[in-house]
Amino acid sequence: MVTKRIRQITAANESLLSFLPMWEEHRLEPDTANFAFGNPQEMVVHGFASALARATEPLDKDHYAYKFSEAGSRARVARHLGAWRDQEFDPEDIAMTPGAFGAIAVALTALVDVGDEVVYSDPSWFFYRSMILSAGATPIGVQVQPDNYDLDLDRLAGAITDKTRLVIVNTPHNPTGRIYPPATLEDLAAVLTDASDRYGAPIYLLSDEPYSKLVFSDATFSSPSRWYPHTLISYSYGKILLTPGQRIGWLAWTPSMADRESLRSAVFMAQIAGGWQFPSAIMQYSLAELERLSIDLLELERKRDWFVSELGAAGYDLRPPEGTFYLWVRSPDPDDVVFVERLAKEGVLVLPGTTCGSPSHFRVSLTGTAEMIERSLPVFRAAI
Ligand SMILES: Cc1ncc(COP(=O)(O)O)c(C=O)c1O
């Protein structure tokens, strides 16, 4: 009854699926310090709900008609991106999607054929493998550098074959918090250009950037789109607003993209055939207001500095993240799942590294509150 593809996808997320019952068991207990996922642990940012409420009022008969990428949304994103990135973007090269999830799914459908290979880096966000498999392609994971979590370009170059159609890079990187520096991105562009020339067709780069506004004050963010012409960027508003349950984001590429007219229609058809991968009317109408909102980045940085220094003082091995809202910590027990279970029994929920393809670590989400951090510190100290 179940398809082979869904069996493969389920197997790719086995470790996440086996973590969920533990998470369900503890997450609603009143004293749980919940750092498992990038979910809000306090009330939504002020102005979000009222922006959505205003956008519900119908202005004409088409207010709730089927929505594609609305012209207003595309123009706004192109303008905003152009100013932010100092790179030109054409509104026609912006596809509005239900978050980065939708943007990644659409890029895979538009660019990847059954049997193609998609290279991504490990550790990684836990759904790349499933999404690549869902597109009928083969996921090829490449380890990042173990010391500083930078891309390992020799390994990446070695993983590219004549079947490679797409490479996915995620910066700022979930789970390590690494932001790839310009020199790495420039070298990445050289590797991809070289491989594209060798195989006679562009290898596309999907730069997955949902955390590109979650950058700490001691770091700067660069997108590979600056160096590699065949880059598509996926983005989500769900991170900067910490509202992952309301879906809006985009997929964008610059005018340097090869064959961009065909890509526009391919992405459009991929959005339709992929199950109407457009954000809802309300999300598109409220975009102007949403773009002015943000979670408190100073508070996030304070939590990072405090948590990193406390965990470090307790003997944990971790690097301060440059972006995202995650800490990536070496597990004192070689079995990360055993260690995570031990913490969970004491009321502290973190994510085992195996879910991200790395059993040696666990991930802590800084979306937990300051009170949760305070409560968790004795547990972390005792567990090590
Ligand atoms: C690296 C990465 N890409 C994509 C996504 C999907 O983001 P969204 O749910 O906002 O679409 C996430 C969410 O955690 C992520 O961490």
Image: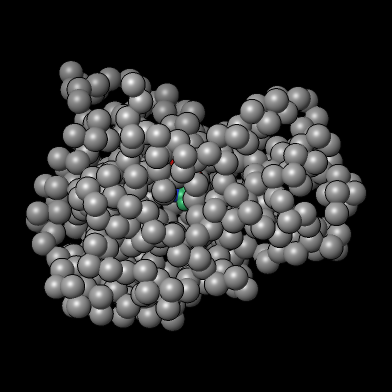
Q: Provide residue 360's location: percent of width, then percent of height.
A: 67, 58
Q: Residue at x 36, y 61 (%)?
A: 119
Quarter of the rendering containing residue 341: top right
Camera sees residue 87: no
Picture colour scheme: one colour
| Residue nearest the viewer, comparing 220 with 179 | 179
Side of 360 relative to 194 (left or right): right
Residue at image x 68%, y 66%?
319
Residue at 67 percent of width and 56 percent of height: 361
Report the label total.
Answer: 0
- Please indicate, yes or no, whether residue 332 appears anywhere in the rendered image: yes
Q: Position of residue 211 (x, y in %)?
A: 48, 54
Q: Nearer the viewer, residue 75 or 133?
A: 133
Height in image: 83 above or below 349?
below
Of residues 1 and 239, which is closer to you in this image? 1
| Residue 242 x, y percent position in the rendering | 53, 40
Q: Is residue 346 left or right of residue 125?
A: right
- The residue positioned 13% from the left and 59% from the top of the image is 260
Instruction: For the N terminus, give its image quadrant.
Output: top left
